[in-house]
Image (cartoon, rainbow, N blue to C red):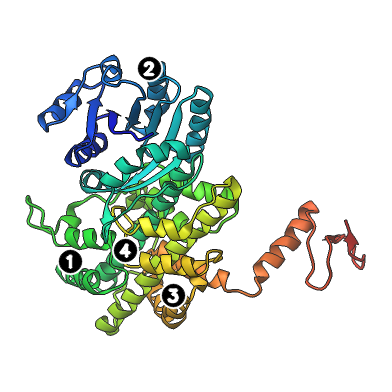
Amino acid sequence: MTVKKIGMIGLGPMGKNLSLNMMDKNIEVIGYDVDAKARNKAIEQGLKVVDSLEALVNCFKGTKAFWVMVPASRVDEVLKIVSKYLSPGDILIEGGNSHFKDTERRVKEAKNNGVIFIGTGISGGEEGALKGPCIMPGGDKKAYDAVESILKAIAAKVDTEPCCAYIGPGGAGHFVKMVHNGIEYAIMQTIAETYHLLKEGLGLEVERIHNHFRKWTEEEIISGYLMEITTEILGTKDHKTGKPIIEVIKDTAKHKGTGKWTSQEAYDLGVPVHSISAALLARIISAYRDERISASSILKGPHLRYEGDKEEFIEHMRKGLSLSIIMAYAQGFALIKAGSKEYNYNLKPDEIAHIWRGGCIIRSKLLPLIEEAFTESPHLANLMIAPQFSKMLNSEVSSLRYVVRTAISCGIPVPVLSQSISYFDSYRAKILPTASLIQAMRDFFGAHTYERFDELGTYHTLWTQEGRPEQRK
């Protein structure tokens, strides 16, 4: 079975642009939205639109294929209504930012009703939806096969190859999209910290910072979509004041939840994601603006400018930024590996890196190297130990250390840059004495036991009775 017509339910910016994308590829698409304004706007742009679900159903003969594109908070509500119009064998595509465990449940519920469900992660924002997003479908493979030609037609293309591939069963597509967004948080924050350091630590004007970002975007391996848009932002003037627009934007960063989900899932699976979690916390503390303003007159710290060679520091900054971005990817792919094992998704990191090369928010020149690393070593434990990255990390990590030391001495918070160092040093540590002491403390107050270096087994010490031997549990 091959689907040739899509009913798009939800004509907000994403649903409308995906529909326009399909229309541009000569794919028949019919839209519906409960909001008459959204319907009228879509009609003005040339889309075929109906004013009720009944009318949408009547546009199909035989198998129906509906694409639900509504906010995550409304997905269950909409699916419940839509399910009344579905028959066994019909196909549902859900492309919002849903939690992957919700998608797992929806796949099972749909299967019980004979409906075939695809939970589809989509990255690229409104522009990507229109011009070509990265598409990460998961769920029923039979349904994917039926809509594959449509998804690949509208996906972004790199060297003529579509940035779309079947990710895996159940909620695999939304799981990978969730991790994508966690990596996105970390990369955005480390870029922002770089801007903060250059502006406040070195005292550079925005125009000069813009020139450095432009050079890095044009020449360096870290170049990617987020670096590109940062360059654009730093080069944009505010039409009201004539100042760089970055200087008039309020310093409270919001988040929609996917970065939080990434950290929560990493904690549940026991995967260290230092940079991703630090990026989330940076957004959260930014929202405490009134408290920060009040605290600034009470709590004191250094407010120094870097007094050394600025060009030399900028070169250290470039290297530090590169390594921090690499480690964000390393943490994300480590989580993908753990999730694949936990949920039996059989995820293919090389294929994920391949489709992330275009359309998505974290596309960059690093991804072909990441794909190469996993192609050469499919069971690679961590990207940092791949030869594509280990040599760079070893030779340039001193620059990242220098940058973080400078930031601390100037009183500039750099949570992701500093946590990148912690991640690197913790991961390469042959022995972590901190963990030994923590296990001893846990055994002292809670008899949680510990293991020894020199013998197998589990041990407990009677700490409060001097001279008593260790007792095996």
Q: Which mark is residue 388?
A: 3
Assess disc 4: are there few (<14), some (14-19) or many (≥20) residues with their C-alpha within 10 Å of its C-alpha.
many
Name the residue rendered at 13%, 58% in the picture.
236
How far apart marks 2 and 4 lie (CA) works out to: 42 Å
Name the residue rendered at 34%, 44% in the picture.
122
Q: Quadrant of the C terminus?
A: bottom right
Task: Give the mark nearer the N terminus: 2 vs 3.
Answer: 2
Task: Give the mark nearer the N terminus: 3 vs 4.
Answer: 4
How far apart marks 3 and 4 lie (CA) works out to: 15 Å
From what the image shows, is residue 36 above or below residue 366?
Answer: above
Percent x, y of residue 78: 37, 23
Going by the numbered disc 2, the residue's amino acid type is: Tyr
Task: Give the mark nearer the N terminus: 1 vs 4.
Answer: 1
Task: Give the mark nearer the N terminus: 2 vs 4.
Answer: 2
From what the image shows, is residue 1 above or below residue 355?
Answer: above
* Callout 1 secondary element: helix
- Tell us which disc is closer to us: 1 or 4: 4
Mark 2 vs 3: CB contact within 8 A: no
Going by the numbered disc 1, the residue's amino acid type is: Val
* Callout 3 secondary element: helix
Mark 2 vs 4: CB contact within 8 A: no
Q: Which of the 4 image quadrants contains residue 25?
A: top left
Q: Which mark is residue 206?
A: 1
Percent x, y of residue 63: 36, 25
Task: Give the mark nearer the N terminus: 1 vs 2.
Answer: 2
Q: Quadrant of the N terminus?
A: top left
Residue that carries the numbered disc 2 in the rendered image: 85
* Callout 4 secondary element: loop
Mark 1 vs 2: CB contact within 8 A: no
Going by the numbered disc 4, the residue's amino acid type is: Ser
